[in-house]
Image (cartoon, grey):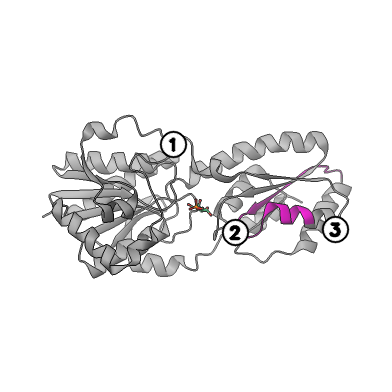
Amino acid sequence: MIKKIGVMTTGGDAPGMNAVIRSVVRTAIYKHLRVCGIKRGFRGLIDNDIEELDLHSVSGIINRGGTMLKTIRCPEFKDKKNQREAVEHLRMHSIDAVVIIGGNGSLAAGASLYYDWGIPVINIPASIDNDLCYTDYTVGFDTAVNTALEAIDKIRDTASSHDRVFVVEVMGRDSGSIALEVGLASGAEAVILPEVKFNPEKLCDLLLRGYHRGKKSSIVVVAEGAAQGHEIAKIISAKTELEVRVSVLGYMQRGGAPTAFSRALAGRFGKEAVEELIRGKGGRMVGMIGNRVISTDIKKVLKASKSKKINMNDYKLIGILAI
Ligand code: F6P
């Protein structure tokens, strides 16, 4: 029987992490559990930066980007000595189980805590990258896409006023999810993704064909993991007469008020994570597949996510709609 749980955010922040924390804390208290917030992810666990949270601690955060618990990437947690200290701190605070909110780095750490140290852990997928399997969406992805969309809509105004091609670089070190989704939603002429081999000739032909048909401005969305926006612009300039400009959207995609979708998903995931722990489960990640909240073994998620595919139908659709 668990009496007290810990909650932490890890890796890159994502809009909606605060809404997850709120859901975890409120559900836990509703179920008569106590909750501790672990600050700065695994660094806080190693450093014993842990404090009890109450209903009021999570007031007024559902609409705020970032994370009230702060976050950090913590490669030191791979070290068994640090893990031992972390586990001692959990015991010191009588924390029986942990909810870890974050992306794929947090899954590996969650697996260590569960499989090597026997701590019941439930992971909640939160990352702007949407790069995990066994969930259709991670918390924060929808917000990041909408932030990028708003920016691209504005860029389109100036692109069409000046008859220019704009290369817009979006985030996604290993994943083209944001580029693909925002490319489709913004009506981009082309997207360049880490998962699909880039063909410079094909891109330039497409832009020139459009130009000669009367399409004087175009948008090319590139995921940072595929290439730098400036590199792509150089290629287009070298192979065509088109006037090209670049916009790197960068970290604005990680911040801002979460969308309704990100907040609602956060609420569902937080509740499910706490309920899984109460059911005696551990070593699992909650997720949503086709509108149903499910949970999956962390190791299975990690293995499958290493080679997560992008939706090639959407990729082809962008090409069809840019005709
Ligand atoms: O959290 C995901 C992400 O924003 C990626 O899209 C990006 O490549 C990476 O994090 C950047 O991480 P950091 O801020 O640690 O350099």
Disc 1 to disc 3, C-alpha distance: 43 Å
Who comes first in sequence, dot 3 or dot 2? 2
Query: Residue beneath label 2, please?
Result: 225
Q: Which mark is residue 251?
A: none
Query: Residue beneath label 1, please?
Result: 260
Residue type, mark 2 in image: Gly
The image shows residue 39 at horizontal and vertical percentages of 30, 46
Who comes first in sequence, dot 1 or dot 2? 2
Q: Is label 1 or label 2 in front?
A: 2
Q: Secondary structure at mark 1?
A: helix
The image shows residue 289 at horizontal and vertical percentages of 40, 55
Stretch of the chain drawn in magenta: 214-234
Residue type, mark 3 in image: Lys
Q: Are marks 1 and 2 in contact (CB under 8 Å)?
A: no
Q: Is mark 2 within 8 Å of ligand 1?
A: yes
Q: Secondary structure at mark 3?
A: helix
Count neighbours of disc 3 (C-alpha within 10 A) and say few if under 14, some if 14 to 19, many if 20 or more: few
